Amino acid sequence: MLKKLIIVGGRGNGTNIAANVEDINRADPEWDLLGFFNDTDEIGSELFGYPVLGRPEDMTSPRFADVSFIYSFITMQYGKNNALKLENYGIPPERFPSIIHPSATIPKGTEIGHGSVIMPGVYFGSYTRVGSHCTLLRNFSLGHGSTMDNYCYGGNGAVIGADVRLKEGAYIGTGAVTRERVTLGEWCIVGIGSVIIRDVPPMTVVAGNPARFIKQRTFETFNPRK
Ligand SMILES: CC(C)(COP(=O)(O)OP(=O)(O)OC[C@H]1O[C@@H](n2cnc3c(N)ncnc32)[C@H](O)[C@@H]1OP(=O)(O)O)[C@@H](O)C(=O)NCCC(=O)NCCS
C-alpha cells in the first residue's frame, strides 16, 4: 500500500521535492502524495498539480495522524528559526521519512537521518553520514568519511572533500568546494562557487576563492536579500 505524504513547503524546494517523489514512484511506487501545507498559498488552491491542504501547524492535527511529512523550510533566510519551529511541533521523527532520488549513489553503510531530501545525482562516498532534515540538491557530492549534522544544506553541484565535518545547519552554496578534513561550523553559509581551504567558524558567512569572511550571521537580523 502506498504511504501518505504531505510536503510542508511551497513553490521552490517544496515543488522540487514533489518532482523527486514522482520520480521515486515511477521507479517503484511508494508514496501517495496528498498535497502541500504552507503559509503562503490559499487553502484549496493547486500547486504543481496537488492541492494546498493546510498550514504547517496542521501537522499536529489528528486528521493527519496517518500521514508522513517532509519539511522543506530549512532555508538560508529562516534556517534556525524554522528548525526550532519544527522541533516545537513535537512530531516524532518516524513521521518524517527521507525522500531519496533513485539516481543517488549511496554505498552500503551510509547513514541518512529522518526527513532529509536527496535530489538527483547526489553522490555519497564510503563511510558518510547525513543527519535529519538535511537538503542535498542535484549533483551534490560528499567525500568519503564526511559527516553532516542535522539541518545542513548542500547546494547544486557543491563538492565536499574527504573527512569533512558539517555541523548543524551548515549551508554550502551552489558549486562551492572544500578541501579535505575541514569543519564547517554551525549555521555558517558558504557562498556560491567558493573554495574552502580552512575551517569556517559557526554563524559566519564566507565566500570567494579562497573563501574570506563576509559577515557574522544572526537570525534576528540576517537577510541576504537586503
Ligand atoms: C555569500 C552570500 C550569502 C552573500 O550574500 P549577501 O549577504 O547578500 O552579500 P552581498 O551580496 O552584499 O556581498 C557581500 C560581499 O561578498 C561578496 N560576495 C558575495 N557572494 C560571493 C561569492 N559567492 N563569491 C565571492 N564573493 C562574494 C560580494 O562581492 C561583496 O563583496 P564587497 O563587500 O567587497 O563588495 C551570497 O552571495 C551567496 O553566495 N548565497 C548562496 C546562494 C546559493 O548557493 N543558493 C542556492 C540556492 S539553489
Image (spheres, helix red, strand yellow):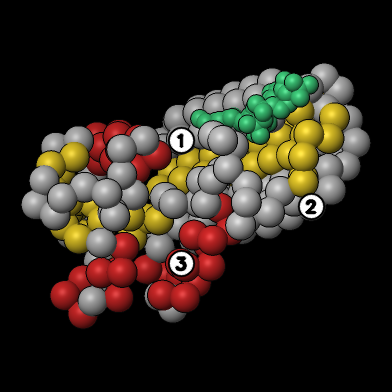
Report the residue at 68% width, 54% height from top: 218
The residue carrying mark 2 is 202
Q: Residues within 10 Å of mark 1 (few under 14, many from 20)?
A: many
Quadrant housing the C terminus:
top right
Task: Give SS at disc 3.
Answer: helix
> Outermost residue toward the right?
198
The quadrant holding residue 37 is: bottom left
Note whether 137 is above or below 151 in the view shown.
above
Residue 190 as seen in the image, left or right of residue 120? right
Report the residue at 78% width, 34% height from top: 214
Q: Amino acid at mark 3?
A: Leu
In x, y percent, where is residue 54?
20, 60
Quadrant housing the N terminus:
bottom left
Badges 1 and 2: C-beta atoms under 8 Å apart? no
Q: Amino acid at mark 1?
A: Met
Is residue 113 visible to us here? Answer: no
The quadrant holding residue 182 is: top right
The residue carrying mark 3 is 86
Q: Residues within 10 Å of mark 2 (few under 14, many from 20)?
A: some
Note whether 104 is above or below 116 in the view shown.
above
- Image quadrant of ligand 1? top right
Residue situated in front as seen by the camera: 105 or 131: 131
- Mark toward the viewer: 1 or 2: 2
Task: Give SS at disc 2.
Answer: loop
- Calculate the distance from the C-alpha at mark 1 to the C-alpha at mark 2: 26 Å
Mark with earlier residue (2, 3): 3
Task: Give SS at disc 1.
Answer: loop
Report the residue at 18% width, 40% height from top: 47
Is residue 201 visible to us here? Answer: yes
In x, y percent, where is residue 16?
35, 35
Q: Amino acid at mark 2?
A: Pro
The residue carrying mark 1 is 119
